[in-house]
Amino acid sequence: MAGAFRIPLFDLNYGKEEEEALLRVLRSRWISQGPETEAFEREFAQFTDSRYAIAVSNGTAALHLSYLLAGIGPGDEVIVPSFTFIATVTPLLWIGAKPVFADIDSLDNLNISRRTVEPLVTERTKAVVFVHFAGFTDGIEELKDFCSGVGCVLIEDASHAHGSRVKGKHAGTFGLLGAFSFFSNKNLAVGEGGMIITGSDEIYRKAKLLRSHGMTRLAWDKIRGGTSDYDVVELGFNYRMNELQAALGRVQLQKLETANRKRRELVRIYREALKDAVLIPFEDYENSANYIFPIILPSGIEREEAALFLHDKGIQTSHHYRPVHLMSLFRKTMGTGEGLLPITEEAGRRELTLPLYPGMREEDVHFVAESLREFIGR
Ligand SMILES: Cc1ncc(COP(=O)(O)O)c(C=O)c1O
């Protein structure tokens, strides 16, 4: 929620269209997975130019299913970033696989890279998970070639990358599977929701089963006619999306390109206004979804003081991310700690996320940039 801040970190890009879509579903009197979800899947597959899209209840479920569908099992090693949201990593623990943390490439490129992944590969490495940090795809092509060369599966956590492309090819289509989150603060937001994309017929068939208890027929199929008998052929979950989420998703998808163009324009202004004051990671913001606007503060600047200074001016900030390997759970269960990933840890200390959302005004961007420059210049 925008809340009490003069300039919040993010704001929903919602209007009348979303209200009407919800009313349409409510009036149809079918609210569980059904025709809206099927339409959203078709439209998302078309948007990303992937053969199949499978809607699920949230991004974490999309990742959990992707890991299972990629054949990751107990004891397998999977190379992951630590500079990510916890949900990239925890589904691996549910499966009994071992996360192996790769450092980010540099303070200019906050993604893992071939350079940081290669030394970690062993004969037990089953897969590599690439997160398009903040929507940036830097390094994905090189990593795809590397994974093919060493026989590892590439999976993309494209939760930040709705509309990110490399030479026209959408994020999530480089690996065997791409997983998306539609959490409230994402470029395409439905509250809770997720999507898996893949080009594989076999994965598509199995994904639909795993999403819904491994059942061969669903409630909506029964409405469509025929027998109501069904079998259970896989150990599945209830990871279904409902019709209200899907209807919101369809409207949000229609708005996505325009909203992303607005984000790009705001990022252009931010970058110009802050270029001598802070380090701005990544360059190719034109092809990025620009989910967030992360900056790296000069060393010696106290991040909490900067955040407090901005807070007092009505500006909400955040940081992405506290590295996963420094979370107590991982320290306790895997023995990870400081010194393991020097670049990730430095970025974890110095990164500050500034407000960014399609409805943000250009003068707000200038105000945020001027306020930050004022703090750094003191
Ligand atoms: C990189 C990343 N991966 C996974 C997730 C998990 O998605 P969800 O919150 O929809 O479960 C998120 C966001 O919340 C995310 O930012």
Image (cartoon, rainbow, N blue to C red):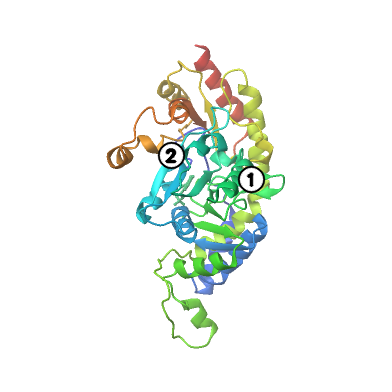
Q: Is residue 192 above or below residue 332?
A: below
Position of residue 222 in the picture relative to residue 73 (left or right): right
Q: Which residue is mark 1?
A: 164
Question: In terms of secondary structure, where does tag 2 sit?
Answer: strand
- Give residue 147's position: percent from left, percent from top: 57, 47
Question: In terms of secondary structure, where does tag 1 sit?
Answer: loop
Question: What residue lies at 56% left-to-right and 68% top-to-bottom?
Answer: 202
Cβ–Cβ under 8 Å for marks 1 and 2? no
* In front of the other: 52 or 71: 71
Q: Quadrant of residue 304?
A: top left
- Give residue 351's position: percent from left, percent from top: 48, 28
Q: Residue furthest right?
A: 167
Near mark 2 (Cα within 10 A), the count class, few <14, some 14-19 or many ≥20, is: many
Instruction: Tell me, yes or no, if residue 9 can be seen here.
Output: no
Q: Which residue is mark 2?
A: 101
* In front of the other: 17 or 193: 193
Mark 1 and mark 2: Cα distance apart in space: 24 Å
Q: Residue furthest left?
A: 332
- Give residue 126's position: percent from left, percent from top: 47, 51
Q: Is residue 278 above or below residue 51?
A: above
Question: What residue lies at 41% left-to-right and 77% top-to-bottom?
Answer: 232
Q: Residue furthest top?
A: 378
Q: Amino acid at mark 2?
A: Phe
Q: Amino acid at mark 1?
A: Ser
Instruction: Tell me, yes or no, if residue 63 can be seen here.
Output: yes
